[in-house]
Image (cartoon, grey):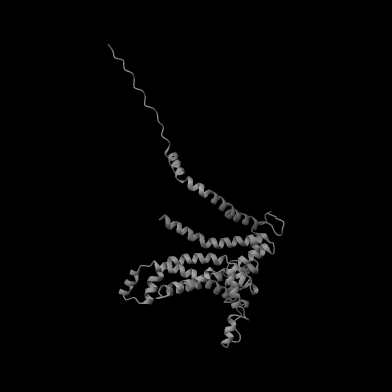
Amino acid sequence: MPVLTRPAAPAPHTTKPPAKTSARSSWWRKHRFSLAVLTPSLIMIGIFVYGFIGYSVRVSVSKWQGLNPDLSPRDPLYQTYDDMFHTPRFQADLRNVTVFTLLFLTLAVVVGLVLALLVHNALAGRTFFRGVFLFPYALSFIVTGVVWRWIFTPSTGANLILQGLGVDHGPKWITDPAVAGDVSSALEPILPGGHFIQVELGIPLALIPVVIAASWQLGGFVMANFLAALTAMPEELREAAGLDGAGTLRYHWHIVLPWLRPVTAVVLILLGHISLKSFDLVYAMVGQGPGFATDVPGIFVFEQTFRALRYNTGAAASVVMFLLVAAVMVPYLYRSVIREKH
C-alpha cells in the first residue's frame, strides 16, 4: 500500500533590511538626543551669526546710506569696497591695525614669557606674584584706556616724572602725528596699483602708547598660559640638562623655549584676533588720534554706521575685519582638526 507523504512546507521568506538602512537607523538612535539638544543652538547660530554675516555682505554691496533702507545693488557690486580702499583714512586704519598687531604680539609675548619664568622660578611668594601680574587682565579695556590716557597725555602722567628728572620737553605720546620709518615711496613701484597709496606706511608714534597699554593688560594672560605649560614640564628635563652640563641660558634656549612653542602658537592666535578687532581700548585711550594715527577699522565701522549713517561703507569695513580675523583663525582651526584626525 503506497504511503502518502505530505510535502514539506516551504521555509518562510525573510527579507533582511539593507545594511545602509540598518546603520542609519542605529546612528539615529544613538545620536537623536544629542541632535535634539544641539538643534536649537545650531538654528540660533545659523541666524544670528552666519545669517547676519550674509546680511552684512548684502548691505555692503548695496546703496544704503541714510535712514531709508536701500538694498538695491551698486553697479559694479564692489564699488563700495573700491571707494573705501581708496580712502586715506581706511588705508591708515589698515596700516595702524597691522602695526599694532605686530608690536602688540611681540611685546605681550615677551613680557608674558619673562613674567612666567620669574614667577615659576621664584623661591617664595609665587602665588602672590601670579595674582599681581594677572590682575590687570581682570580690568575692563575702557578702564585701562582711561587710566593710560592720563599717563600718556603730554601735560600729565609720564611727562611730569620726566620733568622731575630734568627733562623739560618730553615726548608728545598720544598727540604725536609723526610716522616713523615710512616705506610707502619704496613700495609704490613694487606693489600693483601702488600709486593709490595716500598714507605713510610706517609706525605711527602715537600708536606706541596704545601698544604699551594693551601689553600691560594682556601680559598677565600670556604669563598664565606659559605658567601652565611650565608647570606641566617634566622635572627630568632640568635634571638631564644639569647632568649634561647645560647652563641656565642654554637650558632655557634649547629646552624651555621649544617646550613652550605650542603654547606660544595658541597665545599668538588668541591675541592676534583680539588685536585685529580692537575697539574699546583704542577708543577710550586716544580715539582716531592726530591725523588718524591711531584709528583702527573698529572705530571706522562704528563712525560710518552710527554717525555718518553710511551703512554700506560700515558693512564693507566690517566684512574686511571679518576676513582679517578669519585669515588668522581658519588656518589654525584647520590645522587643529587635521591633527585630531591623525
Which residue is rendered at x = 45% and y = 41% of the image?
Answer: 25
Which residue is rendered at x = 59% and y = 86% of the image?
Answer: 163
Q: Is residue 192 above or below residue 161?
A: above
Q: Is residue 112 left or right of residue 297?
A: left
- The answer to which image quadrant residue 326 occupies is bottom right
Given residues 70 and 11, the one toward you in this image is: 11
The mark tally for this picture is 0
Given residues 198 and 55, the one toward you in this image is: 55
Given residues 195 and 4, the one toward you in this image is: 4
Q: Position of residue 107 (x, y in %)?
A: 50, 73
Q: Is residue 323 above or below residue 200?
A: above
Q: Position of residue 237 (x, y in %)?
A: 34, 70
Q: Quadrant of the C terminus?
A: bottom left
- The answer to which image quadrant residue 98 occupies is bottom right
The residue most toward the bottom is: 166
Q: Is residue 315 above or below residue 230?
A: above
Which residue is rendered at x = 39% and y = 73% of the image?
Answer: 252
Q: Is residue 243 left or right of residue 208?
A: left
- The answer to which image quadrant residue 117 occupies is bottom left
- Does any portion of residue 150 appear in the rendered image? yes
Q: Quadrant of the N terminus?
A: top left
The residue most toward the left is: 1
Q: Is residue 49 above or below residue 163?
A: above
Q: Is residue 218 left or right of residue 125?
A: right
Which residue is rendered at x = 67% and y = 60% of the image?
Answer: 311
Q: Position of residue 42 (x, y in %)?
A: 54, 51
- Does any portion of residue 95 appear in the rendered image? no
Given residues 125 and 54, the one toward you in this image is: 125
Q: Position of residue 188 (x, y in %)?
A: 59, 71
